[in-house]
Every structure is written in structure tokens, then in C-alpha cells.
């Protein structure tokens, strides 16, 4: 598993070194609007702990962090008003998924018809 890079952009957001548009925060979790939204609503939910990806988080996070994260995902989606019409959650881990930021995060996308789940890879 890759070592955690504390200079990644979400680590800087958590330390308050870079601004963010927060939609929810609690003891374990921060949720904020994606800077480059791919849907009418596109929010990123991240743990406050230093985890590289789901692979890391699912092995190393405490039960309280795991439960708190899952609860927060549902809470944020409801708070955004997406629970009725629907939404998609997605997490990229590693190279094949083109994970861009090496701090575990889950995308919540919704607010309109999202289309098919995947497009065919080119390569
Ligand atoms: P990934 O490909 O790692 O799953 O997604 C990273 C996401 O982080 C992308 O959707 C990208 O737009 C978003 N992102 C990258 N830098 C920033 C930033 O500085 N602020 C915010 N709010 N989102 C960012």
C-alpha cells in the first residue's frame, strides 16, 4: 500500500491551508463541493483521518470511523435533497481507476439524470 502523502490537496484542505465549500462536517468526516463538478450536485466526502484510498481505509480505519463515514454519506445525500430522486456514489482506488487525489474520498453525484454508469475505456 502506498504511503500517505500529507502534501496532497485534501490533506491541505483538512488543515485549512486551502479553502473549500463545505456542505457537512463532523468528528470523522468533511464533505465539500467538487471544484470541477460532473453533475448538477457533486460533493466529495472524505474522512478526517489520513487514508490513501478505500483499500487503506477499509483495513486501517477504526470501527467508529467506518461507521461514521457510512452514516455521513447517507446524511449528506439526504441533506442535498438527493435521496428521493436518486444519486450515485463512486470511489476511485489506484492507477486503473485514475485516482487523482491520494486521500480516500467518495463522490456523491446527483441532481439530474446521470446516464450510464460507465463509458467504455479507450485503452
Ligand atoms: P478522483 O479522480 O481522485 O476520484 O477525484 C478527485 C476529485 O477531486 C476530482 O473530481 C477533482 O475535481 C476534485 N478536486 C481536485 N482538487 C480539488 C480542490 O482543490 N478542491 C476541490 N473542492 N475539489 C478538488
Image (tube, rainbow, N blue to C red):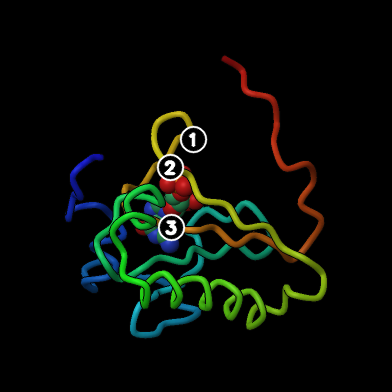
For mark 3, does the 10 Å Cα neighbourhood hold few (<14), some (14 to 19), or many (20 or more) residues?
many
Name the residue that disc number 3 marks. Answer: 105
Looking at this view, is 100 or 26 the one in front?
Answer: 26
| Alpha-carbon span between mark 2 and mark 1 | 6 Å
Q: Give coordinates of residue 56: x percent, y percent.
A: 32, 51
Q: Which residue is mark 1?
A: 97
Residue 93's mark?
Answer: 2
Kindly report the distance in space between the C-alpha atoms of the residues bearing marks 3 and 2: 9 Å
- Please tell me how crowded label 1 is: few (under 14), some (14-19), or many (20+) other residues with Cα within 10 Å: few
Q: Are marks 1 and 3 in contact (CB under 8 Å)?
A: no
Taking the image as shown, residue 17 lies to the left or right of residue 69, namely left
Precedes in sequence: disc 3 or disc 2? 2
Q: Which mark is residue 66?
A: none
Write the residue at 31% across / 64% down: 61
Of residues 24 and 94, the one nearer the viewer is 94
Q: CA distance from mark 1 to mark 3?
A: 13 Å
Amino acid at each position: 500500500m502506498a504511503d500517505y502523502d500529507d502534501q496532497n490537496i485534501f490533506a491541505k484542505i483538512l488543515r485549512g491551508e486551502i479553502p473549500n465549500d463545505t456542505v457537512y462536517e463532523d468528528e470523522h468526516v468533511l464533505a465539500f463541493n467538487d471544484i470541477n463538478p460532473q453533475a448538477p450536485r457533486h460533493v466529495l466526502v472524505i474522512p478526517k483521518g489520513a487514508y490513501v484510498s478505500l483499500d487503506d481505509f477499509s483495513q486501517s480505519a477504526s470501527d467508529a470511523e467506518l461507521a461514521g463515514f457510512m452514516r455521513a454519506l447517507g446524511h449528506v445525500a439526504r441533506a442535498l435533497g438527493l435521496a428521493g430522486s436518486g444519486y450515485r456514489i463512486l470511489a476511485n482506488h489506484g492507477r486503473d481507476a485514475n485516482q487523482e487525489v491520494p486521500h480516500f474520498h467518495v463522490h456523491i453525484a446527483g441532481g439530474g439524470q446521470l446516464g450510464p454508469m460507465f463509458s467504455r475505456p479507450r485503452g
